[in-house]
Image (spheres, rainbow, N blue to C red):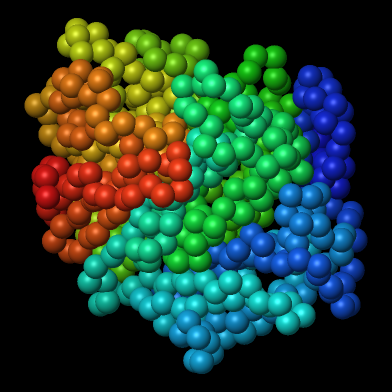
Amino acid sequence: MPLFTPIDIARFINPDRREVIRTLGLGAGFFLTESTVSQHLWAKPFFKADPFSLGVASGDPAADGFVIWTRLAPAPLKTAGGMPPVAVEVAWELAADEAFLKPVRSGKAIAKPAMAHAIHVEIGGLETGREYFYRFSIEGIRSPVGRAKTFPVPSAAASIRFVSAGCQRYEDGFFTAWRAIAQERPDFVAHYGDYIYEYKAIKPDASRPVPIARDMPGMPEKCLTLNDFRQRYAIYKLDPDLQAAHAAAPFLSSFDDHEVENNWAGFDSEYEGVSKRAFALRRAAAFQAWYEHTPLRAAQMPKGPDILAYRRFRLGDLLQVDMLDTRQYRDPQPCGDGWKYCVDARDERRTMLGKAQESWLFSGFAGKPARWNLIAQQVPMMRFDRDPDSTLVETHMDKWDGAEAARKRLFDAAKEAKLANLVVLAGDVHHNRAAELKVNFDDPASANIGVEFVATSISSGGDGEAQPKSTSKLMQANPHLKFFNAQRGYVAHTLDAARWRADYRVLDKVSTKDGAASTRASFVVESGKPVLEKA
């Protein structure tokens, strides 16, 4: 007997919020299925405002292609983006140059109301390792131009430049870091998650530790329904700096907690009294909206409260990227979450990835090896002890520290496969870290299995500070930690067959639009030597 009852998605496009709250309280869970909204084609579309107000994006590149995305929304903050409940035909073009003087491919796609009039076009058969430009049009109205790039083949994989970034709370600051990323025009962007924050909009409060840099339009309530999530993505995607970054490079996208709910785990809500069935409803709405607003392939289209977000990318013989999902299959945080010493965190049965994803990851270790093996995921994998007393350990249960056996299984699998050059990316914690990953964190002298680069937030947490007062204590408690910083920004990565370089790019402020970017620290890892060296 199925755990969840299938319910038509149309019922949850514009529901009465009180009804949804009652539903959550009663503990009912639902699958979101195909809507009964009209799919008839709009013969002669007419728009009073720009239908491409949310910009364009590309994502999930391969050696021969990528996905291009847009969403029609002439009134983006209104229900359905101001679109009527009918399907619309949209033309797309791909060219070898930004002026579109060298056309490569063109076609048409249907924007359906059941998918919020979002379009995901998967393009293949292209040349490897080169950039292309794309745009959409409808009734003579053209979208902005976007840039995408295919992955290189082995013979062409001389070097790769990419960025890792995430955590962008709207009210906490401006997205100036995205503008800087757009100017770099990297080969791709690895977004670790927290693309939106699901919280109720922050009211003006002079006592709030982090000042409100800008008000969220409409001051919306907490995201519960599909329409709530759709509107929240529209608010974020109207930001010109974020639009510029999407137009500049393809994204490898993942989600963390705030795309659904803070610190969620599997079908467990952060809040007491919310049943698994009830949380499934919110998760399904959140995943539907995430897919609609993200340049993903059809393979990632959600099925109710489930989505296949973990996937693998290969850039010739130079780089393998395993993008993980550390939310959907994990066990609930032990000992009630938060900072603490918790014996249950060492339970051999605990998982972060679930059996199927863990098996998929480990089998990928044993395949044809790449020079560099990257695990792109959400929460820090390193041990991070905030107590400088060597006899005490106090870690955070929402991170890999809350599932120590799962981390050990991963390290053991990498060691058994003789995995070359393991690099881990993470985010979530709103500060920068660079660390060496120890085979045994209880023994500082044990061998390194790889390195980890944790990217700070784009804006979450406000301006931050270059060196928090706790830095020296944290470095003392974690000898494998080589860098700690709490400014906003991103990490720019450059790698070739010989070495990997990570540049920590930070903003002096995000509380105003005129923040300046600079490089705070740089580290290099030589191939075959999992040690962090200052550049």
Q: Is residue 514 visible?
A: yes
Residue 344 vertical placement versus 381 (above, below) = above
Residue 480 vertical placement versus 358 (above, below) = above
> Residue drawn at (52%, 71%), measured in percent from left and top?
146
> Which picture quadrant has residue 94?
bottom right
- In the rendered image, the quadrant that contains the N terminus is top right
Residue 422, how many percent across, how many down? 24, 47
Is 277 situated left or right of 240 in this image?
right
Q: How many marks?
A: 0
> Which picture quadrant has residue 493?
bottom left
Is 416 situated left or right of 218 in this image?
left
Residue 373 vertical placement versus 101 (above, below) = above
Is 75 situated left or right of 340 in this image?
right
Is 365 situated left or right of 172 in this image?
left
> Residue drawn at (54%, 57%), measured in percent from left and top?
240
Q: Is residue 369 visible?
A: no
> Residue drawn at (61%, 54%), measured in percent from left and top?
238
> Which picture quadrant has residue 441?
top left
Residue 403, how many percent across, how many down? 39, 24
Residue 336, how many percent across, how many down? 50, 13
Residue 161, how many percent across, how many down? 30, 62
162 vs 370, nearest the viewer: 162
